[in-house]
Image (cartoon, rainbow, N blue to C red):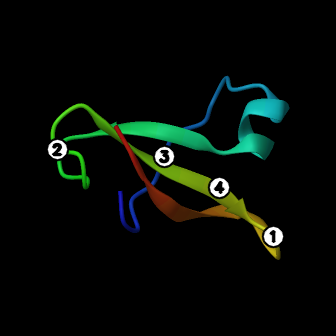
Amino acid sequence: MGGQLLDVTGWASDQIDEGVALVTEAGSFGPGGRALYDPRPADPGCWDWQGDTP
């Protein structure tokens, strides 16, 4: 996602607090892999990439 916005409208607060695994076509594991993002500790309104997973 790299700097893109993610619409979390309608998400429960615990989902927003935990981070997300987004399906990606361009990650380390190719199409269908997931990019992992967690809230930034000092600014939970921003999420940082943590890595990729199959």
The quadrant of the rendering that contains the C terminus is top left
Side (left or right) of 50 relative to 35 = right
Side (left or right) of 8 relative to 3 = right
Residue ID for mark 1: 41
Mark 4 element type: strand
Q: Position of residue 20 (x, y in %)?
A: 58, 40
Nearer to us of marks 3 and 1 is 1
Nearer to us of marks 1 and 2 is 2
Residue at the extreme bottom: 42
Residue at 16% x, 37% y is: 31
Residue ID for mark 4: 38
Nearer to us of marks 3 and 2 is 2
Mark 4 Cα shell of 10 Å, populated few (<14), some (14-19), many (≥20): some
Nearer to us of marks 3 and 4 is 4
Q: Are marks 4 and 2 in contact (CB under 8 Å)?
A: no
Residue ID for mark 3: 6
Labels 1 and 2: the sequence-earlier one: 2
Q: Are marks 3 and 4 in contact (CB under 8 Å)?
A: no
* Tag 2: amino acid: Gly
* Tag 4: amino acid: Asp
- In the image, residue 24 sits, relative to residue 14, either above or below, namely below
* Tag 1: amino acid: Pro
The quadrant of the rendering that contains the N terminus is bottom left
Nearer to us of marks 4 and 2 is 2
Residue at 25% x, 55% y is: 28
Side (left or right) of 32 relative to 42 = left
Report the Cα–Cα distance between label 3 and label 2.
Answer: 21 Å
Residue ID for mark 2: 30
Along the line of sight, which residue is nearer the eye, 37 or 53? 53
Labels 4 and 2: the sequence-earlier one: 2
